[in-house]
Structures are given as structure tokens and as C-alpha cells.
Image (tube, rainbow, N blue to C red):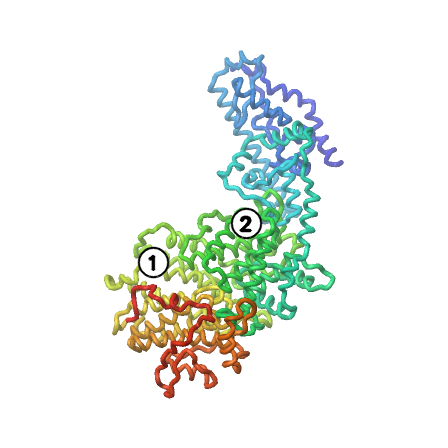
């Protein structure tokens, strides 16, 4: 009521001038002649819709009243003094057709048909004066409009006490609302306006995952640039299509049906849930370790839902069951509940995780892509993480992460949520940032491992990094997010926060290393090396031994290691082309040293985690394999008898490869040797260095490499469990081996490594173990001879492929 009274008080004195102002638009002959005095037209700052309705206007684009009335598309302002556009979309269309039939006088971006009674007088105007007047009017209109916008923005930012307030994201959004982005679309169904549909869908989906991102060259973006097209389509539908009784979507009923289906229990997934004690242990391993690196869930919110998950009177939805299954699939092989039993070459824990991954993937593929929620994207990220940890479909990692990036771009996860046409809560804004950061890191590492380009380097990213805050500091009811903690303070989101600061450098390196082939000269490589070193030095100096709580999960060692490794790994491919150029110029010795130091640092960082019992990182990455190969590469390039620093440090190089083998053997004994090529190549690299250094003969080194490989697989045979069903004929040999090794069948997994000087296998495995693949011998020091009657068919591995002639070089 007060608004209306105030509006009347403002509009009242001007009401009697309204008709005169409109008549002034049709300038009379006396005002048009060069000798007459022209009236100065006052620019109206209120929008045309508010003026038509005689209401107060906030003078924004769109204004507050047009937004509240559900007609923001009708909020327009005068493009010249005194101009009034048509009041309806039909009139807009009519005037558009009339423009093609008669000459127009242009003022800014719009045109107006002159009055026929003034046609003679208009022709007498000087062309230069008319253009100058139009340009002056346009300039004055723009300046006064900008002044009004600045006053409005300052009025919102200055509190009553007169103190200065820094502009928040909300005020920044209000200040820039005059140019709303045209890249966000919501399909207009029925006879509702697109903006009304956007608000309805935003209420259904607060994270705004149903929006469709379109690039600036998209046809839909071009369509929205046409002025008046939206109103024209809506009013055409109202006037001409509604009488035809075209059925409209009952959005409310469809939403209720979707919610009912979403809440339904999935009996297939529910039957796969392990007992509560085992599930609790696996969930705890995931939350304590993996969530420090890749932020996928909000831990307090998940814990509340997890308690309801086990409540007797609370129904389980298929989505919540899939979320728990995909989460424990990640930590299945790392959990303390591992039985140490194997089925073929894979552990029983790996077989269970693979079964969970398959079931959750099948459930996710049946869900609608149009009506996805946050939990669906969380499940998708967790499934990829589980495949990565358990090495399931390794050849599709890069394809999978590329699909994740494209799905994320489709819903605009790479865009700042403050630019969206609907309001997104602070909680969902932060979750959007975290999911996007997680997908980006997935794709970058998959691209690096394959040596393929990343799609992220082609994407314009304007979303902020996740804040350096703990999950306890905000929830779904938070009205604003807390500020990021100081860089010296570690939180569970620290990795995601600080990893973003090196993203531009890493994307530039990806373009150099995986883009079109270019010849990098020595100076350019040194410049990129300086960039990497600068980013490493800019990382926060956390106290790695600090502990804010009783558990080890709040120590920053895990995030600190990954932040350093993901930068140091680029030094190896950068300097690799210059290794063989050492003989031509002494300056390339620097590349040898940087190359060797980078590989050495990767091994030592992983080993430090391994010594503390943290296995998360080397389950996520393949640094142990790549480091062993790179160390072998730099070692064999050194001339025999050289006094170089690398060659003088050859014993340390062998110890580093031993550490890599220890990491790989621990993973094999927990998860299974589902990547046997990696372990066989590491054994071969170790034997090749010993041959190159003259520590062993070629035959002895080959025998040791094969012996080490077979010894590990024999231990897998010792933990075999009987197979059931169609594979029953294969149980004969497995049962024989299991009975033969029954004393050690239920032993816990051992992580002991094999010494560099290889003793007899009977001594390694203990007196109770026999060696069925070797011929019996009475001399403990005698080199064992393979038994030709033994085979490894039970393991399902083709050793000819692993140790076949895939390279033209042999051991020398």
C-alpha cells in the first residue's frame, strides 16, 4: 500500500504531462525547423512495463517488479527520449513488418516510423543536424542510465551506519544483472514463459542441474538475441494454439511421479549391501582418505543420511544404495576386512568391488539424464574412482573422464553459479565447485597417463576454486559460505583449493606435451621448468606432522604429496627428449639431473606414505611403474665406468626401484595382479640395470626377474579359493594347490619385499612351501630348473604376452 501511495505521489505530478510527452514524440513542424527552438526531452529511467502499470520501478534490467510479476522478458527501457515501444508482442511484430514498407528514422538500436503529417517538414531537416541530435540523445540516455545504475548499486552496498562494505557475490550479481547471459536455456513447453519454467525447475532442482549450457555460437543463443521473439511465441501460443486444446504438461504430477520412483527401493542393489560392520569400516576408510583429495560428498550431510540408511523404519532409495555401494567399492581393497583370498589372479575383494561397480553402473545407465540430481553425479564420480583404484577397464579411463567433462559442461559446472538465471543456494554453489574440480583432476591425470590431450584445456572456466573450508562450517541451510581459511591452515578441501592455482600452468604444459608436435628448444624447456618450480614453491608450507585430532586423517601429508607429485611429473616428459643429447653438448647434463631427481622424488614421496601405512595415493596413480621405468632409462644411458653423479649413485637407483617393486607387490597382494604387464616390466627394468652395471650376468639377471615374477604369482596360487558353477572343472588344480598349501591359506597378506640378492625360492617361501614349477634339488644354493609339467592356467594369464618379443632389444 505504501509503495502504491509513494508511486502515486511520484507519478501524480507527471501524469498530466504524459500525453504531452507522447505528443512530443511526434515533433511538430515548428519544432523541426532549423530556426525553431527544440524542446529538451527528459529521459525516463523507469521501465516501460512499470510506467504502463503506473508502479514504482527499481530501474534495473530486469527490475524487481517485473521479476516478481513473472514477466522479466517484458522489462524494457526507452532507447531514445520519449520513445514508447508497442505494448504487446503483436504490435512489435506489426511494427517490424511496417519497417520494411516505409523509411525509418534510427535512434540507437530501434527505429520509428515518422508521422505522415510531418513528412514534408522532416525532409527539410539538415542531415548532419539530425544525426548529431540522435547521437547526442543516445549518449545522454546511456550516461543517465549508467548513473542511475551506479546509484542503485551504491545504495545497496552502503549500510545505514555509513560504513563501507565490500561487495559480495550477491551484490556483484545485482550490479551486473543489466546484461544477463544468453547462454543458459530452459526449454519452453506449453504456454509458460521460459523464465517462469526456469524458476519452477529451480525449485524442483536447487543445484540447477537441469539447465542446458549453450555456447555463444549456438542457434538457441542466436534466437534469444532476437528482440521480442519470446513474447511473440508466447502470445501466439495463447491466442492461436490454446483454442486447439493442445495438451499441456502436468508438471506437478510428473514431478510427483519422478519423486516416487526416485524413492523406490532397488532390490538388486539392496541385496549386495554387506553387513553393517563391514560397510561402516569401508565407508570410514573412504571418508578419511579419499575425500581429502577428491571432494565428492559433503561429509556431515552424508553421515546424517547414512544413519537413516540403516534405520529400520526408513525406506532405502535406489540412489542412496547405489551411493553407498559405489563408495565402498573405492575402499574395498584397502579396508581392514580384506580376507586375503584370491580367485584366479584377482583377490576376492577385487571381485566383490567389480561386482558392485557393475551393478551401480547398470542402475545409473537406467536413470534419466534430464532429471538428474546431485547424487547422480556423485555416484558417477565414485564409480570412476572405484574403477581407477581397482583397475577396471583401464583402457577406457581417458574416454570415461572425457565423458565426465562433457556432462559437466552440459550442465554448466564450469560456469560461475552467480551468472545463472536462477538463484542457487551457497551449499549447492560449493558442491558444484567441488564436483567440477574433481572431474577436472580426473581428466588431467587420465590424459597424462595416456599421453593424450585433455578436453579441459579447450574450455573457458570462470568458476572459482572450492573454498579452503571444512564441511562442518556450512550445510544445506547456510545462507552464506564462510571465508576460506588461511593458506597455512589445512582442511579437507585444501587439495582441491590449492590445486586450482596451478591449473593454468598444467593446462599450458598439456598443450605443449600432447598438442600438435612442436620443437621445444632448450631455453623454452628451462622456462617451463622455472614455471613448475615456481608453482611448487607457491604451495602452502604445512607442518606435515601436525594433528588437529586423534585420527591420522587430518594430517596434510596426503594432500601435500599429491600437490607436489602432480607438478613434478611434468619435468620428466619435458626433459626426456634431451637425455640422448648429452653426448653432443654438456649443457644437457642439466636435463639428466632434473629428469633423475624428478623420478627419485616421486618414489621417495610415495615411500614416505607407504611407511606410514597410507596406501591411497599409489592405488590412485601409476607413479611406481613410471618411476621405475624412468630410473631404468636414465641409468642405462650412462656410459659404463662413468663418474657422473647419476652413475655414481647406481646403488641408490636400485634401492629406489626396489621401493617401486614393494609398492606394486603390496597392491598385487591386496587387489590382485590385474595389471601384470606393469609388474613384469618393473622386474625386467631391475634386472637390466644390474646387467648394465655389471653386478650380474645377463643370464642371472633374467633368471632373477622371472623368479621374482613367478614367486609373487605362486603366492597368489597359495591363497586360491574353490570356484563354483561352470568353472568347476578348473578347481582340480586349484584344490590340489590349496590342499598342498593349507597351512598358509588363511594367513594375512604379507607386504615383505624380496631382497636384491635372490636366494632359493624354498628359502623365501619357507620350509613348508614346495615349488611345483621347479625341478626338485638337494643343493640349496643350486639354481633351480623350471618344471615343464607345471602351468599357470589357473591364474588366467598368458605369460607369453607378458614376456614375449614385443621389443626388438634384448637384455645385454
- Which is more toward the observer, 84 or 56? 84
* Horizontal side of residue 215 vs 262, given as left or right: left
Which residue was labeled with disc 1?
526
Q: On residue 754, which mark appears?
A: none
Hey, which residue is sitting farthest right in the picture?
1
Mark 2 Cα shell of 10 Å, populated few (<14), some (14-19), many (≥20): many
SS for callout 1: helix
**Which one is closest to the eye, mark 1 or mark 2?**
2
In which quarter of the view is residue 351 placed? Answer: bottom right
- Residue 244 position, x and y percent, is 68, 29
SS for callout 2: loop
Hey, which residue is sitting farthest bottom in the picture?
778
Hey, which residue is sitting farthest left in the picture?
584
The residue at the point 26 percent across, 63 percent down is 582
Q: On residue 413, which mark appears?
A: 2
Mark 1 Cα shell of 10 Å, populated few (<14), some (14-19), many (≥20): some
The residue at the point 62 percent across, 54 percent down is 427
- Which is more toward the observer, 279 or 518? 279
* Horizontal side of residue 38 vs 254, given as left or right: left
Q: In which quarter of the image is the C terminus?
A: bottom left
- Which is more toward the observer, 758 or 804? 804
Q: Circles 1 and 2: CB distance less than 8 Å?
A: no
Q: Is residue 322 above or below residue 120?
A: below
Q: In this view, does 498 lie above or below 109?
A: below
> From where the camera sits, is residue 614 visible?
no
The residue at the point 63 percent across, 37 percent down is 189
- Residue 268 position, x and y percent, is 63, 60
Q: Quadrant of the N terminus?
A: top right
* Horizontal side of residue 514 vs 809, given as left or right: right
- Residue 225 position, x and y percent, is 54, 34
Amino acid at each position: 500500500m505504501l509503495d502504491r501511495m509513494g508511486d502515486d505521489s511520484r507519478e501524480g505530478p507527471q501524469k498530466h504531462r504524459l500525453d504531452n510527452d507522447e505528443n512530443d514524440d511526434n515533433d511538430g513542424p515548428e519544432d523541426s525547423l532549423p530556426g525553431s527552438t527544440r524542446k529538451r526531452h527528459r529521459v525516463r529511467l523507469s521501465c516501460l512495463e512499470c510506467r504502463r502499470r503506473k508502479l514504482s520501478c527499481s530501474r534495473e534490467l530486469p527490475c524487481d517488479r517485473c521479476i516478481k510479476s513473472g514477466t522479466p522478458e517484458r522489462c524494457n527501457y526507452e532507447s531514445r527520449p520519449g520513445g514508447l515501444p508497442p505494448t504487446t508482442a503483436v504490435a512489435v511484430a506489426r511494427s517490424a513488418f511496417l519497417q520494411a514498407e516505409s523509411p525509418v528514422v534510427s535512434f540507437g538500436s530501434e527505429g520509428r516510423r515518422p508521422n505522415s503529417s510531418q513528412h514534408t517538414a522532416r525532409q527539410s531537416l539538415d542531415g548532419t543536424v539530425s544525426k548529431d541530435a540522435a547521437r547526442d540523445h543516445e549518449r545522454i540516455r546511456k550516461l543517465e542510465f549508467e548513473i542511475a545504475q551506479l546509484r542503485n548499486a551504491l545504495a545497496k552496498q552502503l549500510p545505514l551506519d555509513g560504513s563501507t562494505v565490500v561487495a559480495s557475490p550477491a551484490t556483484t550479481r545485482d550490479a551486473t544483472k543489466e546484461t544477463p547471459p544468453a547462454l543458459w536455456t530452459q526449454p519452453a513447453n506449453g504456454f509458460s514463459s521460459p523464465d517462469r519454467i526456469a524458476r519452477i525447475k529451480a525449485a524442483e532442482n536447487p543445484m540447477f542441474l537441469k539447465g542446458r549450457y549453450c555456447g555463444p555460437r549456438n542457434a538457441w543463443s542466436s534466437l534469444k538475441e532476437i528482440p521480442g521473439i519470446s513474447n511473440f511465441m508466447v502470445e501466439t501460443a495463447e491466442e492461436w494454439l490454446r483454442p486447439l486444446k493442445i495438451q499441456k504438461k502436468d508438471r506437478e504430477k510428473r514431478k510427483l511421479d519422478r519423486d516416487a520412483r526416485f524413492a523406490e527401493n532397488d532390490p538388486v542393489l539392496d541385496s549386495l549391501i554387506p553387513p553393517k560392520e563391514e560397510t561402516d569400516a569401508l565407508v570410514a576408510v573412504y571418508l578419511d582418505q579419499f575425500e581429502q583429495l577428491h571432494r565428492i560428498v559433503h561429509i556431515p550431510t552424508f553421515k546424517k543420511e547414512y544413519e537413516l540408511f540403516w534405520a529400520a523404519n526408513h525406506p532405502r532409495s535406489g540412489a542412496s544404495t547405489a551411493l553407498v555401494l559405489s563408495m565402498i567399492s573405492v575402499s574395498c581393497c584397502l579396508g581392514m576386512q580384506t580376507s586375503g583370498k584370491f580367485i584366479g589372479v584377482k583377490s576376492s575383494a577385487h571381485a566383490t568391488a567389480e561386482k558392485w561397480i557393475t551393478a551401480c553402473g547398470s542402475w545409473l545407465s537406467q536413470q534419466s539424464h534430464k532429471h538428474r540430481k546431485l547424487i547422480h553425479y556423485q555416484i558417477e564420480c565414485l564409480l570412476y574412482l572405484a574403477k581407477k583404484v581397482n583397475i577396471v577397464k583401464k583402457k577406457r579411463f581417458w574416454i570415461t573422464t572425457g565423458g565426465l567433462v562433457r556432462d559437466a559442461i552440459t550442465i554448466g559446472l564450469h560456469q560461475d553459479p552467480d551468472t545463472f538465471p536462477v538463484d542457487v543456494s551457497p551449499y549447492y554453489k560449493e558442491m558444484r565447485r567441488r564436483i567440477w574440480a574433481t572431474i577436472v583432476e580426473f581428466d588431467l591425470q587420465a590424459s597424462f597417463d595416456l599421453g593424450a590431450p585433455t578436453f579441459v584445456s579447450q574450455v573457458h572456466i570462470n568458476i572459482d576454486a572450492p573454498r579452503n573450508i571444512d564441511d562442518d562450517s556450512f550445510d544445506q541451510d547456510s545462507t552464506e559460505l564462510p571465508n576460506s581459511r588461511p593458506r597455512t591452515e589445512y582442511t579437507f578441501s585444501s587439495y582441491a583449493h590449492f590445486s586450482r592455482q596451478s591449473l593454468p600452468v598444467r593446462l599450458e604444459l598439456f598443450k605443449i606435451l600432447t598438442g600438435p608436435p612442436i620443437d621445444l628448444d632448450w631455453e623454452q624447456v628451462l622456462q617451463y621448468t622455472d614455471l613448475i618450480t615456481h608453482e611448487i614453491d607457491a604451495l602452502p608450507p604445512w607442518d606435515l606432522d601436525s594433528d588437529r585430532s586423534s585420527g591420522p586423517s587430518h594430517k596434510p601429508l596426503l594432500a601435500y604429496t599429491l600437490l607436489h607429485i602432480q607438478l613434478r611429473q611434468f619435468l620428466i616428459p619435458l626433459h626426456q627428449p634431451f637425455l640422448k643429447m648429452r653426448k653432443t653438448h654438456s649443457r644437457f647434463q642439466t636435463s639428466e639431473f632434473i629428469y633423475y631427481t624428478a623420478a627419485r622424488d616421486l618414489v621417495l614421496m610415495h615411500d614416505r606414505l607407504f611407511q606410514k601405512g597410507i596406501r591411497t595415493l599409489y592405488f590412485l596413480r601409476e607413479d611406481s611403474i613410471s618411476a621405475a621405468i624412468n630410473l631404468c632409462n636414465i641409468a642405462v644411458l650412462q656410459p659404463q665406468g662413468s663418474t657422473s653423479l647419476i652413475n655414481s649413485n647406481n646403488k641408490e637407483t636400485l634401492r629406489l626401484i626396489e621401493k617401486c617393486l614393494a609398492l606394486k607387490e603390496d597392491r598385487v597382494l591386496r587387489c590382485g595382479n590385474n595389471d601384470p604387464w606393469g609388474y613384469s616390466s618393473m622386474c625386467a627394468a631391475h634386472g637390466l640395470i644390474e646387467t648394465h652395471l655389471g653386478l650380474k650376468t645377463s643370464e642371472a639377471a633374467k633368471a632373477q626377474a622371472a623368479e621374482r615374477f613367478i614367486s609373487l604369482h605362486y603366492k597368489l596360487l597359495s591363497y586360491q579359493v574353490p570356484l563354483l558353477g561352470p568353472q568347476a572343472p578348473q578347481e582340480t588344480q586349484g584344490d590340489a594347490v590349496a590342499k598342498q598349501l593349507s597351512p598358509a591359506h588363511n594367513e594375512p597378506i604379507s607386504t615383505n619385499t624380496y631382497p636384491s640378492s635372490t636366494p632359493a625360492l624354498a628359502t623365501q617361501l619357507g620350509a613348508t612351501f614346495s615349488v611345483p614349477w621347479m625341478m626338485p634339488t638337494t643343493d640349496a644354493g643350486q639354481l633351480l630348473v623350471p618344471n615343464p609339467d607345471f602351468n599357470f592356467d589357473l591364474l588366467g594369464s598368458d605369460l607369453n604376452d607378458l614376456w614375449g618379443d614385443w621389443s626388438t632389444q634384448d637384455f645385454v
